[in-house]
Structures are given as structure tokens and as C-alpha cells.
């Protein structure tokens, strides 16, 4: 991820996505408000519907807790996706 840069979500990315994971209900609401047609593909990353607090501007401990939660929930989603057909190495 050394070369990774964040990208602002836009209509082209939303249209390409099969699954969009949001950290909380507020994030989900903003996405669906912007693009109502994508409601069925926007899910909370936490399978139990729990909120993951956005750590922006918080202390290091909040970032670490957020990273741990995202790691845990990412594993949940990866176990449910057919990653063999999704990832194409070039």
C-alpha cells in the first residue's frame, strides 16, 4: 500500500462497484442519498450493523482501534466473496 492514494468516490466508481461497504449508518445514508439506485449494494462493513467510529482528527488509539475493527470485518467479507473471480493479477 505504499503507493496507495485515497480517491474521492464518484459516479463512475459507484457504477462499477458490486459491493460498497460503509463504516456506519451515516456514511451509508450519505451514499444512498447521493445515488439512490445503489441502495441494495451498500452495506455496513460490520456484519452485526455496528458503527465504526471515523478516527479522523482523533488520538492514535482511536486510529488503532478503527484499524483493528476494519481488519476484523474485512476478513468477514473476504470469507464471503469469491475472490478467485474478483482479483485478476496482471
Image: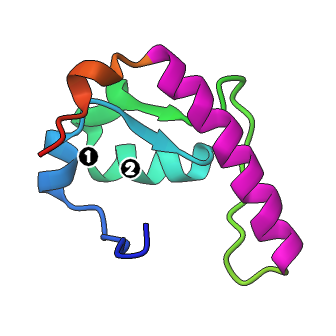
In the rendered image, which residue does mark 2 sit on?
Answer: 31
Query: Horizontally, is 72 left or right of 30 in the view?
Result: right
Proximity of marks 1 and 2: CB atoms separated by less than 8 Å? yes
* Residue 8 screen position, x and y as percent: 31, 70
Q: Residue at x 34, y 32 (%)?
A: 19
* Residue 1 screen position, x and y as percent: 43, 66
User: Magenta segment, which residues?
Assistant: 60-80
Residue 65 forms part of the magenta stretch: yes
Q: Residue at x 70, y 57 (%)?
A: 67
- Callout 1: 10 Å neighbours few (<14), some, many (20+)? some
Quadrant hosting residue 10 = bottom left
Q: In this picture, is 2 found above or below 35?
A: below
Q: Residue at x 34, y 28 (%)?
A: 41
Query: Horizontally, is 12 left or right of 82 in the view?
Result: left
Element marked by disc 2 = helix
- Callout 2: 10 Å neighbours few (<14), some, many (20+)? some
Q: In this picture, is 77 found above or below 88?
A: above
| Residue closest to the eye, 76 or 27 | 76
- What's the colour scheme? rainbow
* Residue 71 screen position, x and y as percent: 66, 44
| Residue closest to the eye, 33 or 31 | 31
Q: In this picture, is 17 found above or below 30?
A: above
Total labels drawn = 2
Query: Horizontally, is 51 left or right of 4 in the view?
Result: right
Residue furthest toward the front? 90
| Residue closest to the eye, 16 or 68 | 68
Alpha-carbon span between mark 1 and mark 2:
6 Å
In the rendered image, which residue does mark 1 sit on?
Answer: 35
Q: Residue at x 49, y 26 (%)?
A: 78
Amino acid at each position: 500500500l505504499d503507493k496507495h492514494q485515497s480517491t474521492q468516490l464518484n459516479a463512475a466508481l459507484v457504477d462499477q462497484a458490486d459491493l460498497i461497504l460503509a463504516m456506519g449508518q451515516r456514511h451509508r445514508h450519505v451514499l444512498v442519498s447521493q445515488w439512490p439506485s445503489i441502495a441494495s449494494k451498500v452495506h455496513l462493513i460490520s456484519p452485526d450493523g455496528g458503527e465504526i467510529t471515523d478516527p479522523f482528527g482523533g488520538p492514535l488509539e482511536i486510529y488503532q482501534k478503527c484499524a483493528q475493527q476494519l481488519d476484523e470485518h474485512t476478513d468477514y467479507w473476504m470469507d464471503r466473496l469469491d475472490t478467485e473471480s474478483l482479483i485478476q493479477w496482471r
